[in-house]
Amino acid sequence: ALHAALRDDAASGVALMEPAGVESLRLPPGGDVGGAVASELAEVALENGRSVRAKLVVGADGPRSRMRALANVGVARWPYGQQGVVATVRMEGAEQRQATEQTAWQRFLPTGPLALLPVAPAGYCNVVWSTTPDHATRLMAMDGVAFAEAVNEALAAPAAIARGALPWLLPRGEPPLPPPRASEAVGQRGAFPLAMLNARQYVDRRFALVGDAAHVVHPLAGQGVNLGFADAAALASTLERGLAAGLDVGDLVLLREYEAERSRAAIAAMAALHGLHTVFGAPGGVAGGLRAAGMGLLNALPPARRACVETAAGVGPLSWASTGSF
């Protein structure tokens, strides 16, 4: 859809080259001090034999970023030993479709969290299921109807700790919405190993990384996309400030401003999401009771609940996805 919009907008000033795999990347030489050499551009050689020279190259090609590798940027990686299964499901009935338009559901299971996220068009949801490698293999082998039924059973399964078991720790708050039911999985499903990843640097002379090419967080709260959008917004804002000051957009000093802002935000998100993963992954009745108590207390405190919603949506003063919040 994005490519189609750019093709249709002749005034955008964007030239699309597709298909166009990257063969090599050459950045201006120099140490890690000072600005980029204004007279020397970065050069990207494409697999079709063409080459492009630019003041700034942005790597936005995902967690296995070729641009990051070609720029010789190392990463710190922490595997979780889990698989993430992603799919799209069709929801049952008109009432179910309406219920999923603006509401997301997440269930914390012993094997990992399961999220049901609304997408367009109405009546469809994306599934992100973090689970064990063996269970992921079974989910991938199911037909569309069986997969949807597995999602329904997991979302509707009784809680490990009954709400009435700890009445003094579980304020009533608002009752939770019942999860909707999926009728079948549509389109392709995918499975990928889950890991936390952070590039050792986000920028170099005439080069910047954004989104999953720079950092990868656990998908349990769906925050990866918000961090990526905020990276793009922060980079655009940094470049705008630089241009207004008469600077070269590939100047390393300027790009370091972007790196400082977004690396802090990414590390904060990694710490928070890894903490949630650890807390909700801890087995045992005591841990389950404390988790239930915490969620019940959160549900009973509208200001705290609202702050969590704003953070998850990538807005508000506490959000690591908001530019300028750190």
Image (tube, rainbow, N blue to C red):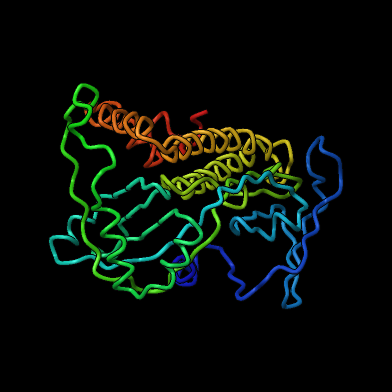
Q: Quadrant of the N terminus?
A: bottom left
Which of the two residues, 82 or 252, is positioned nearer the viewer here?
A: 82
Residue 91 located left or right of residue 227: left
Residue 25 at x, y percent in the picture: 77, 60
Judge whether 26 appears above or below 80 on screen.
below
Residue 35 located left or right of residue 241: right
Residue plotted at (64% across, 58% down): 64
Question: Which residue extends farthest front?
Answer: 285
Judge whether 291 appears above or below 80 on screen.
above
Residue 106 located left or right of residue 170: right
Quarter-of-image position of residue 282:
top left
Residue 238 at x, y percent in the picture: 59, 39
Residue 277 located left or right of residue 296: right
Judge whether 117 appears above or below 11 on screen.
above
Residue plotted at (48% across, 37% down): 278
Count of all numbered marks drawn on residues in the image: 0
Judge whether 208 appears above or below 278 on screen.
below
Question: Which residue extends farthest bottom?
Answer: 48
Quarter-of-image position of residue 314:
top left
Quarter-of-image position of residue 297:
top left
Residue plotted at (30% across, 57% down): 118
